[in-house]
Image (cartoon, helix red, strand yellow):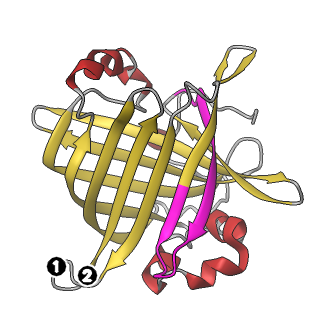
Amino acid sequence: MSVPIYQQALGAEFSRLQPELQEYFSLAPGSGQYGVGEGTFDVVGCRQRWLRPLLRLTSGEEAFFPEYGENVPFRIENHAHQDPFGRSSLTARREIRFPGRTRLFQDTTSATTRGGGTQLVDYVGRYRRLVTDLNLGVTPEGRLRGVSEVSRLFLGPLRLPLPRALDAKAYAEQWWDPSEGPHGRHRIQVKVIQPQIGLVLVYAGAFDYRLRPYSGGSSAQSYLPRYAQPDRWENRV
């Protein structure tokens, strides 16, 4: 079985994560299982009303959305697989259940080689047109921190790096909270910040997580259920 991509990227630092986080990020291609998380976002979406019409224009990408809510149920599925280009990857598919409408938010994180080490690259949205570098770290408490930065767009044959003044960064932190619920729960907090605008998107909440076997017992390293596949794959970095 291949090494999970977060372990590849963190190296020895992976062992400093809380044990529950090590288990969460240990899903690897060929395991025959996928992860399912269900919980509630305390807050999720865009707080700035004037920005929501712009996000509505991009909602079909299944990367950003114009709604904002509190105490919103959600579901996440994690699928470890090899992408069509042979890279070890993790595809996440999120269903955010706003009142009257469910929004999808999907991405694939792939392990690439850069400078002699592993660099995680995140392909965002159903067409995987927005690409960022995902840089990881571990806090003294064993939490995982990630920063998505250096964004670029792939439009047809064009590779368009976003200027620093326009680029938004996503700051994520995930941890295990033993005081949450009767048995403890995972918690996550993500903020997307653009220098000129400020806070573009936020979500924070708690969830339960479990592994399930694939229907039919598939353990092929390249297996990814059809409903979790994007409309388009991207190989460029």
Q: Residue pushed farthest right? A: 116
Query: Disc 1 marks which residue?
Result: 181
In the rendered image, the vertical position of residue 169 relative to residue 159, given as above or below: below
Q: Are marks 1 and 2 in contact (CB under 8 Å)?
A: yes
In the image, what residue occupies the spot 34% across and 70% down? 209
Q: Position of residue 189 (x, y in %)?
A: 35, 57
In the image, what residue occupies the spot 60% across and 52% down? 223
Q: Residues within 10 Å of mark 2 (few under 14, many from 20)?
A: some
The answer to whether residue 129 is magenta is yes
In the rendered image, the vertical position of residue 46 relative to residue 159, given as above or below: below
Q: Residues within 10 Å of mark 1 (few under 14, many from 20)?
A: few
Q: Amino acid at mark 2?
A: Gly
In the image, what residue occupies the spot 44% across and 25% down? 61
Region in magenta: 127-146
**Quarter of the figure with the C terminus:** top right
Query: Disc 2 marks which residue?
Result: 184
Q: Position of residue 16 (x, y in %)?
A: 57, 84
Is residue 162 shown to the viewer in this render?
yes
**Closer-to-camera residue (91/165):** 165
Q: Amino acid at mark 1?
A: Gly
